[in-house]
Image (tube, rainbow, N blue to C red):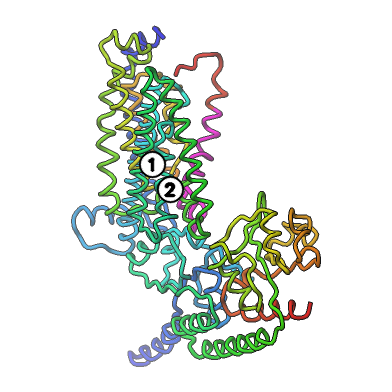
């Protein structure tokens, strides 16, 4: 074999490897991971965080831990060349350490609206080299939100809803204003009955009655833990609310609706349809 | 108690051997800890990184991981472990109470209130502000305990004041937790279980003097603490002045433990158990106990941190979980193995 033939053969063998040298991405945040999968860019993922619970396939990837309690070395151990992080990834020191080690960290802004979600999809599309898919997905999402807005505008009344985050021991935590659940309720055409308080707040049975919600929303993921609809109806105070009397207890996909990712429009539309035609 | 005093001088040479062994154990644990982590680094590369660093040569490969992540973290673990255990040992001697630990003078709870207040009320307070606020909170709580406690003679009052201030501080944490948003709430968990994850050279440079300098002063009080074992009256007869010793020791412990807690959160258990372990095994001579506690605390925390970083890699466990989970059963085993009433405070 002469030198030229060897060189050509070697180049032909090596070239495909170089071309497909995938970026090694660590995705931090359930919404970011969902978007990466929706763009079919998951081949580049080497790890996710523990809030990345959808799609199912994400569970197969290494888990770097809870998104606000990351370990710098744990993330670096996966030899990433890009970190796609949701806005509240932390702690700050760990993120500084990761940047300090020379890894590119892209933090995505807080998203709480249709426009935010589209911008997030496009940004992740750019960063993963899937800009085209991102354009298509963003247009789809945009169309879904437009249809939802139309349906919401056509609603004769807007139901008062309260979202109960955790219902473990003690008083349940209701989602007040400035929470993802608050925005999701409004997106779906409802009125947040707990919008007087900021953030997630424990509510007593009495204040639950005072809020007078027409609907009580809970996370589908917690439905077994609270004993389903009957369990919620048995909670103190619930029976005396309009929602309790009409048995309008709705379990929604928490991550899908509250993640403000590609699935939020569909989930909000499903919720809207549900309270438009009870 | 007289037998205690009589037995002190005899044990000295044995104690030196134990201290030497502890130093060796600390070096071994530290080396092991430097080699362990989410990133697999060959022992030769760890040594290479250290040599290149000491020799001022350019960093290569994973040098950065060893030098800017693991090494400052290891040194912080050594300093904090030593501070917590020596603080515990001093408090147990000063209060002549085996249940005393640095937390008792309010420093940990005060620091927690300070940190939590900065997180919840400080808007987007940076990590430096949180640490400073924790440090100040710890010192304020300790000062309160001390001022209230010394209005009457004797240590019992100081102990009770500590209990009360601790309760108030924890109520403050509870109230602030209630006010916190969900994200702030998650940042707060750090304070209840501790973490050494925030270690960096710049932080270490700020915190180390506050931890180490008070620690270096504590062994000088060993003879006085030994005299206190006989009771305050007897200590006074021997020429020591408990009423002067008390504020000094409380201040030294508050400084070093306060600085530790400010940067790592509340890491329980080390301050209570390491001194016990050593006292149960080697007797109550504080000339030995203070130094041995420093080494023992450092060993325990370095080992716990190495495990915290690796057992759920690439994630990380809170270190407080490990100190209690690993140390607790061992301590119980030690406790149950002993028979009779030879327990000496």
- Chain bearing mark 2: B
- Label 1: which residue? B29
Residue drawn at x 48%, y 54% is B316
Q: In this view, does B28 lie above or below B121?
A: above
From the viewer's perspective, is A197 left or right of B96?
right
Q: What element carries label 1?
A: helix
Residue B320 on the magenta segment: yes
Pointers 1 and 2 within a single chain: yes
- Label 2: which residue? B306
Residue B314 seen from this side: no
Q: Are marks 1 and 2 in contact (CB under 8 Å)?
A: yes
What is the x, y in percent for residue A114?
A: 55, 82
The residue stretch that appears in magenta: B306-333
Of residues A14 and B184, the one drawn nearer to the viewer in this rendering: B184
Q: In this view, does A19 lie above or below A78?
A: below
Quarter of the figure that contains the C terminus of chain B: top left
Of residues B80 and A207, the one drawn nearer to the viewer in this rendering: A207
Q: What element carries label 2?
A: helix
């Amino acid at each position: 074999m002469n030198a030229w033939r060897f060189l050509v053969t070697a180049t032909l063998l090596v070239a495909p490897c170089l071309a497909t040298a995938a970026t090694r991405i660590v995705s931090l945040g359930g919404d970011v991971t969902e978007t990466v999968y929706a763009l079919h860019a998951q081949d580049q993922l080497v790890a996710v965080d523990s809030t990345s619970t959808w799609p199912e396939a994400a569970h197969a990837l290494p888990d770097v831990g809870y998104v606000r309690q990351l370990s710098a070395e744990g993330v670096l151990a996966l030899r990433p060349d890009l970190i796609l992080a949701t806005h509240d990834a932390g702690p700050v020191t760990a993120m500084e350490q990761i940047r300090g080690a020379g890894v590119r960290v892209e933090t995505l802004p807080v998203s709480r609206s249709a426009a935010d979600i589209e911008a997030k999809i496009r940004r992740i599309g750019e960063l993963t080299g899937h800009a085209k898919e991102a354009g298509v997905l963003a247009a789809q999402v945009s169309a879904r939100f437009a249809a939802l807005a139309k349906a919401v505008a056509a609603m004769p009344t807007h139901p008062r809803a309260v979202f109960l985050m955790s219902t473990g021991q003690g008083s349940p935590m209701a989602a007040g204003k400035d929470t993802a659940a608050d925005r999701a309720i409004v997106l779906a055409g409802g009125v947040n009955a707990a919008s007087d308080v900021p953030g997630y707040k424990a509510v007593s049975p009495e204040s639950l009655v005072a809020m007078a919600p027409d609907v009580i929303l809970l996370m589908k993921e917690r439905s077994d833990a609270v004993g389903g609809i009957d369990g919620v109806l048995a909670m103190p105070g619930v029976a005396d609310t309009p929602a309790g009397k009409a048995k309008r207890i709705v379990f929604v996909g928490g991550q899908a609706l509250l993640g403000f990712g590609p699935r939020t429009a569909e989930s909000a539309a499903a919720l809207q349809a549900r309270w438009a035609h009870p | 108690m007289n037998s205690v005093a009589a037995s002190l001088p005899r044990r000295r040479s044995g104690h030196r051997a134990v201290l030497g062994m502890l130093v060796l154990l600390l070096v071994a644990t530290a080396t092991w800890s430097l080699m362990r982590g989410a990133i697999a680094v060959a022992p030769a590369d760890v040594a290479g990184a250290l040599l290149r660093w000491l020799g001022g040569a350019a960093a290569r490969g994973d040098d950065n991981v060893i030098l800017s992540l693991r090494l400052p973290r290891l040194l912080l673990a050594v300093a904090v472990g030593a501070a917590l255990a020596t603080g515990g040992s001093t408090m147990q001697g000063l209060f002549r109470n085996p249940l005393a630990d640095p937390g008792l003078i309010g420093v940990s709870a005060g620091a927690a209130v300070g940190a939590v207040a900065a997180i919840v009320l400080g808007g987007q307070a940076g990590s430096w502000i949180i640490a400073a606020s924790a440090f100040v909170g710890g010192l304020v709580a300790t000062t309160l305990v001390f001022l209230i406690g010394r209005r009457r003679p004797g240590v019992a009052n100081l102990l009770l004041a500590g209990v009360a201030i601790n309760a108030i501080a924890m109520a403050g944490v509870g109230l602030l937790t209630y006010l916190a948003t969900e994200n702030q709430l998650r940042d707060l968990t750090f304070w209840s279980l501790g973490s050494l994850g925030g270690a960096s050279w710049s932080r270490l440079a700020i915190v180390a003097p506050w931890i180490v300098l008070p620690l270096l002063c504590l062994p000088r009080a060993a003879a006085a603490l030994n005299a206190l074992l006989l009771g305050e009256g007897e200590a006074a007869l021997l020429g020591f002045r408990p009423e002067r010793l008390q504020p000094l020791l409380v201040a030294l412990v508050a400084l070093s433990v306060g600085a530790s807690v400010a940067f790592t959160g509340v890491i329980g258990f080390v301050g209570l158990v390491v001194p016990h372990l050593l006292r149960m095994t080697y007797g109550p001579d504080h000339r030995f106990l203070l130094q041995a506690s420093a080494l023992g605390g450092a060993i325990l925390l370095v080992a716990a941190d190495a495990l915290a970083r690796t057992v759920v890699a690439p994630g990380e466990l809170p270190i407080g979980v490990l100190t209690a989970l690993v140390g607790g059963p061992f301590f119980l085993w030690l406790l149950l193995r002993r028979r009779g009433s030879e327990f000496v405070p």
